[in-house]
Image: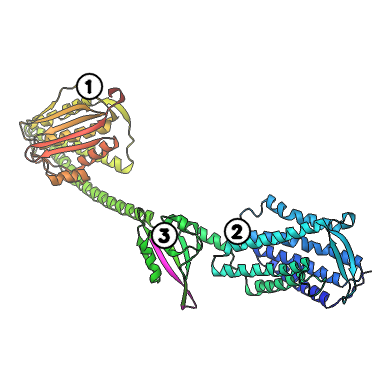
Amino acid sequence: MLDLTFNLYSIILVFTSLIVMALSIYIAFSLDHLTRWLATTMIFISVWGFFYGFELASSTIEQMLYWVRFQYIGISFAPAVWLMFTLRYTGYRYWSKPVVIIGTFTIPAITLFMVISNDLHHLHYAETFLIDEGTSFPLLGIKKGPYYIIHVIYSYLVFFLGTIILWRRFRKADPLFKNQTRLLIIGGLFPLVFNFFYQTGIIAPLGPIDLTPFAFLFSYLILGIAISKYGLFSIKPIAHGRIMESLTKGVLVFNINQRLIDFNSKAKSFLKQPEKIKIGAQAHEIFKSEERLLQVFKDPKEQSIVFNPAKSEKTIRLEIMPIQENNADQVGLILLFDDLTEEIKTNEQLRKQTEDLQKLNDLKDKFFSIISHDLKGPIFGVKELIHMTHTGMISNEEFFEMVPEVSKNMEQVAILLENLLAWASTQIRKEYLEIQDFDILQLIGQQKKLLDRIANEKQIKIEIKDSPPLVVRGDRNMIDLVLRNLINNSVKFSKPETKVLLSAEPEGMEAKICIQDFGPGISAENLQKIKDGVSFTTRGHQNESGTGLGLILVREYIAKNEGRLEIESELGKGTTFCIYLPLAKKST
């Protein structure tokens, strides 16, 4: 039978332990995982205090040692759980690694085993005895064994390590987290002061009675009430840190003294000297190379400014937000940095694409006009000529007299139609380049034969400069259309009894193909339009119509074949178009 005589000290311990335990269980099951670790520490302290109350109510040494075994469930594991809480609270990423958990809880488990089996080895308690003289009730006396010293050293080291972790992490943090941390540290250190006095015997106001559980229960009672009733730790550093790191903007938070109290890692990418960004740094140290940013601290007001950092091509938007307390006193300043470089580039690309689309729409409207006028006119003319011949309105002799003129018109229609189809192909499905090696002089000769008849009718002679075979690399069909357009243009604008000179020769790693005429030349204004890809039309020497489509295709096809176009022209003397194409490997 257990003979228990409860006194004032034991009643206070048991009653307070039950309250703290109830609060701890409520916190553990009502709040999140982070606060749950602190609640678990409080539960172990409650176990210690509860069974120490029963020890103080016992009258025999056997009863006291019985309750001591239960006390050490709390005494052994409370320091380890406190350390785990501090690791979680400060955001230590490896807190749940097996090596950390095993290393933390191994000694507490050994301590509990040593206490339970102390009668076999006496390593924890070298000797136990009853103190019943000079006290109001019997107390347990102990002589410390070697393992008892190991346990005390471990407990102190773990408590102090957790405290140091807390202080180092939040000594210069936001005031909210700093106050929370101070309360935790005081709650942990305050009971240890009483334990130090108990262990050393320097101050013992109640003799052999250990005041440590009283101090722990008092501290954790206040802490438990603050957590459950007032929402202490409802804003947690780890959650706060994750939110800060998830922001795409750089964040710097300064207090009223212009000292940095918080930031996220993104902020370092916005400044020339990111190593200056650290908790406690002054604003003038961080922005030493950005004098303009220091001005915002002289007149802090809500505003947004855009600037280019020194020796950087970035464009940064800085938002300044004063932190005010009770809508009156300013207590700090938040700076938000946002990189606008890509946004500006994207807007510029969109603007250019809009302009290109507008040009394309204008070109499309123009070519629809061409289809309705330049194509419809000649085709309808042929249709009417055939109809008039068929009905006898004109004789066969008159018909054959008109055929040369009709043929000339249809040649231009054929070239125009070919250009329209090629342009439509580029806009609708894009061309598939069929790159091959071919003799450019052979292609020039074919175009000469094709356009000789039109040139002869205008008394223009097309001549090809004698050259050995010259093999280039490109899309044969595209280059064929390029040559046909340029030679046809030269014939169209040349004066009667003049020449169009064609030549092809190697020049370095390229082939230089030139078409030279002796027509009216091209004005500087129109030369610039050709370079800019702007469509325009001009009439030929015999008033032949043009669309401007041919030169657009020429520029586009030459570029697709990794070539380039150069134009030399002099008003009244003529024009030379020179195409540069890559030579085939066997020609280099």
Amino acid on which the number 3 mark rests in the picture = Asp
The residue that disc 2 covers is 91
Name, please, the residue furthest toward the left.
497
Residue density around tag 2, few if under 14, some if 14–19, many if 20 or more, within 10 Å: some
Q: Earlier in the sequence, mark 1 or mark 2?
A: 2
The residue that disc 3 covers is 338
Q: Picture coordinates of residue 521 (x, y %)? A: 10, 40
Q: Secondary structure at mark 2?
A: loop
In the displayed structure, would residue 390 be above or below residue 131? above
Answer yes or no: do the residues labelled 3 and 1 have beta carbons within 8 Å? Answer: no
As measured in the structure, the alpha-carbon distance from the residue carrying label 1 to the one carrying label 2 is 76 Å
Nearer to me, 293 or 542: 293
In the displayed structure, would residue 362 be above or below residue 88? above
The residue that disc 1 covers is 469
As measured in the structure, the alpha-carbon distance from the residue carrying label 2 to the one carrying label 3 is 27 Å
Answer yes or no: do the residues labelled 1 and 2 have beta carbons within 8 Å? Answer: no
Nearer to me, 378 or 140: 140
In the displayed structure, would residue 217 be above or below residue 518? below
Residues drawn in magenta: 317-328
Amino acid on which the number 2 mark rests in the picture = Gly
Res 502 quadrant in image:
top left
Number of numbered discs overlaid on the protein picture: 3
In the displayed structure, would residue 401 be above or below residue 528? above
